[in-house]
Amino acid sequence: VQCPDPCFKKKHQKRRMVTDRVISELADGMLAGSYLFVQSDVEQVSMQMADVIAANGRFERVERIEDAVAPSAAIEPVARPNATVGKDYQDHAVGGGEWEHKGTGAVEGSYNWLQENPLGLMSERE
């Protein structure tokens, strides 16, 4: 699920795509051993998605996605150009700073994002 919410401001939170219901349906329908990869170019949206998934309790967080061809190696990310400087979308006013399950996805106070996007895809803000 990559960059699912183009309208990330507080007044649009009711339109979030990654919800308790969607995550429950994914948990019911995904095969054992499947990966659910979520990404946003707005950190608060990423935090909200991680919190909703963690609150569900049926997904296990992993530090890397194994390549199906070489199970012992992580997927090599596609080479990407450096990101350009843009607007700071982490501002408190962007998402309001409050949401259901806030902090549930954090591990020891941090969300511990992957160092690299294993799919190598960029958003329009990267």
Image (cartoon, rainbow, N blue to C red):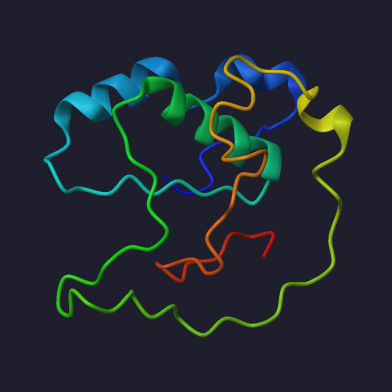
Q: Position of residue 61 (x, y in %)?
A: 39, 45
Left or right for 67, reference 64: left
Work out which quarter of the rendered image holds the N terminus and state it. top left
Residue at 52%, 33% in the rendered image: 49
For the point 38% across and 63% down, which residue is it?
A: 64
Horizontal side of residue 43 vs 72, given as left or right: right
Q: Is residue 50 visible?
A: yes
Residue in the picture at 75% in, 21% down: 10
| Residue 118 appears left or right of 33 | right
Compared to 32, does 53 lie above or below? above
Res 58 quadrant in image: top left
Answer with left or right where residue 98 lies relative to residue 62.
right
Place residue 99 in its image quadrant. Answer: top right
> Looking at the image, is 45 positioned above or below residue 10?
below
Task: Give the image location of residue 123, x and y in percent.
Answer: 58, 59
Return the x and y of residue 91 as percentages of the image width and height: 87, 38
Q: Quadrant of residue 124?
A: bottom right
Residue located at (84% from left, 67% from top): 85
Residue toward you, 9 or 98: 98
If the image is split into quadrants, where does the C terminus sit? bottom right
Q: Quick one: 50 or 2, which is closer to the camera?
A: 50
Residue 6, visible in the rendered structure: no
- Estimate the x, y position of residue 52 in percent, counting from the top left: 48, 25
